[in-house]
């Protein structure tokens, strides 16, 4: 027999043989009655064919009219597979309960797929979704993709676009971040360019306003570099928004000290493992008691139940709480020197100098620790705006 189609397997099929004087007439009558025979073959003076199991009884009167004897030679399909369980009431009842439970669960949101945004915007998006009522386990009928997308745009200022689509029990959230744009310069506001720190002017250019400082001039913090008060040829004065770039050679004194005696926090070796199950947004603790109190460091991992590419609304979260303790520790000279140099480099990077021209360091080591002082000379942009207030 040929391989059954899905429809034939669900309804069940019956394979039979017809033997008699007029099997061809029997086949013609079956065709006129539109009984849908298939896989018809003639073997050893008899005809074999297949029919849907529910239509087999309709062949019997046709066979009697033609003097043909029918004999069932095989039964296939789902109804005959379930036949041995017809006296077990739990089987059909369990099947109905399974179908009902599957239909009930399909009314809720199983998974929510979020876009990958910047670390600053991602928590805001997740909180905005919770404020809109979108979370795992909520009813699909309560979700309006257009409404939630509009609320995301209103509540998260960093987004340029947001959309929410519901595909069955899966919700897909898509969003785009705004590209940073430099704020426009308000040239209507008059201001001067003054020095934010002292130094020796190396280069100075003006796009608007009058130059006050000159090259190789030593200036102090707050000195006027480019004036926003311009004098016209007729002797009148005009207030403008001064714009320009001033680079100066500046000096910085950096200092750090690392003692040999350190107080450090480390893990004591005691670990407490807690597990939680999440089903449709409902948290089910899999442990007794309360969360540990005291100073602990927590790490966690989450296992999600996934079938193929479909993530089911069931996950298990494992948390490991590591107890911490504070200990007194003595570090050696090499370690203290390394930490001190790292601190100096961190302070230098925070200065954001355009170029480092010279650098000298003095390292002092005594019985208490390591002390480093550094003298830095470099190029820096020292011009900052200072608004001119008109009374």
Image (cartoon, helix red, strand yellow):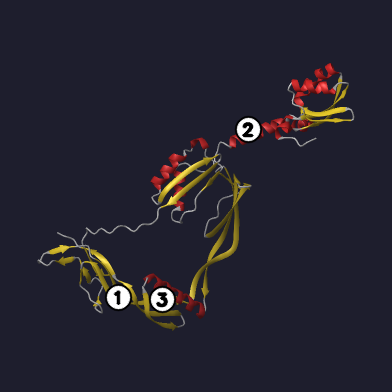
Front one among 212 and 278? 212
Residue drawn at x 17%, y 62% as measured from the top left = 239
The residue that appears at 13% across and 64% down in the rendered structure is: 237
Q: Residue at x 28, y 75 (%)?
A: 203
* Residue 260 drawn above or below residue 17: below
Residue, disc 2: 100
Q: Where on the picture, by quarter, is residue 21?
A: top right
Q: Quadrant of the C terminus?
A: bottom left
Marked residue nearer the N-terminal end (1 or 3): 1
Label 1 residue SS: strand
Label 1 environment density (alpha carbons within 10 Å; few <14, some 14–19, many ≥20): many
What number is the disc on residue 248?
Answer: 1
Q: Vertically, is 350 above or below 37?
A: below
Of circles 1 and 3, the one toward us is 1
Q: Do labels 3 and 2 touch, CB within 8 Å?
A: no
Q: Is residue 28 visible?
A: yes
Between residue 175 and residue 3, name the one nearer to us: 3
Marks 2 and 1, how far apart at CA: 78 Å
User: Picture coordinates of residue 131 (x, y %)?
Assistant: 44, 44
Residue 256 marker: 3
Quadrant position of the N terminus in the picture: top right
The residue mark sitting in front, 2 or 1, is: 1
Q: Going 33% across and 75% down the picture, which residue do you hit?
A: 379
Asked whether 333 or 163 is in front, the reply is 163
128 displayed left or right of 207: right
Q: Secondary structure at mark 2?
A: helix
């Amino acid at each position: 027999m040929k391989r059954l189609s899905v429809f034939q397997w669900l309804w069940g099929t019956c394979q039979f043989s017809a033997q008699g004087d007029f099997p061809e007439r029997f086949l013609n009558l079956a065709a006129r009655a539109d009984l849908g025979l298939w896989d018809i073959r003639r073997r050893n003076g008899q005809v074999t064919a297949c029919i849907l199991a529910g239509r087999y009884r309709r062949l019997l009167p046709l066979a009697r009219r033609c003097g043909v004897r029918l004999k069932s030679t095989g039964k296939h399909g789902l109804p005959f597979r379930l036949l041995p369980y017809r006296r077990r009431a739990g089987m059909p009842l369990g099947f109905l309960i399974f179908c009902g439970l599957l239909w009930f669960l399909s009314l809720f949101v199983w998974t929510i797929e979020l876009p990958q945004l910047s670390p600053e915007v991602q928590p805001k998006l997740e909180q905005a979704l919770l404020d809109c009522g979108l979370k795992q386990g909520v009813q699909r009928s309560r979700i309006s993709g257009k409404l939630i997308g509009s609320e995301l745009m209103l509540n998260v200022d960093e987004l340029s676009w947001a959309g929410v689509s519901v595909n069955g029990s899966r919700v897909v959230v898509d969003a785009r971040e705004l590209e940073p744009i430099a704020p426009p310069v308000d040239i209507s506001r008059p201001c001067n360019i003054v020095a934010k720190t002292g130094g020796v002017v190396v280069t100075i250019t003006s796009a608007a306003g009058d130059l006050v400082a000159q090259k190789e001039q030593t200036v102090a913090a707050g000195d006027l570099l480019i004036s926003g008060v311009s004098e016209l040829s007729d002797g009148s004065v005009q207030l403008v928004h001064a714009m320009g770039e001033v680079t100066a050679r500046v000096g910085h004194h950096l200092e750090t000290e690392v003692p040999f005696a350190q107080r450090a926090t480390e893990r004591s070796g005691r670990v407490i493992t807690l597990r939680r199950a999440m089903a449709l947004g409902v948290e089910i603790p899999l442990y007794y008691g309360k969360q540990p109190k005291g100073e602990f460091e927590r790490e966690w991992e989450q296992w999600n139940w996934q079938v193929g590419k479909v993530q089911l609304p069931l996950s298990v979260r494992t948390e490991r709480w590591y107890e911490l303790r504070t200990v007194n520790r003595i570090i050696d000279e090499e370690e203290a020197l390394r930490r001190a140099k790292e601190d100096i480099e961190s302070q230098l990077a925070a200065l954001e100098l355009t170029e480092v021209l010279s650098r000298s360091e003095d390292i002092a080591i005594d019985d208490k620790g390591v002390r480093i002082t550094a003298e830095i000379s470099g190029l820096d942009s020292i011009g900052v705006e200072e608004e001119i207030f008109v009374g």
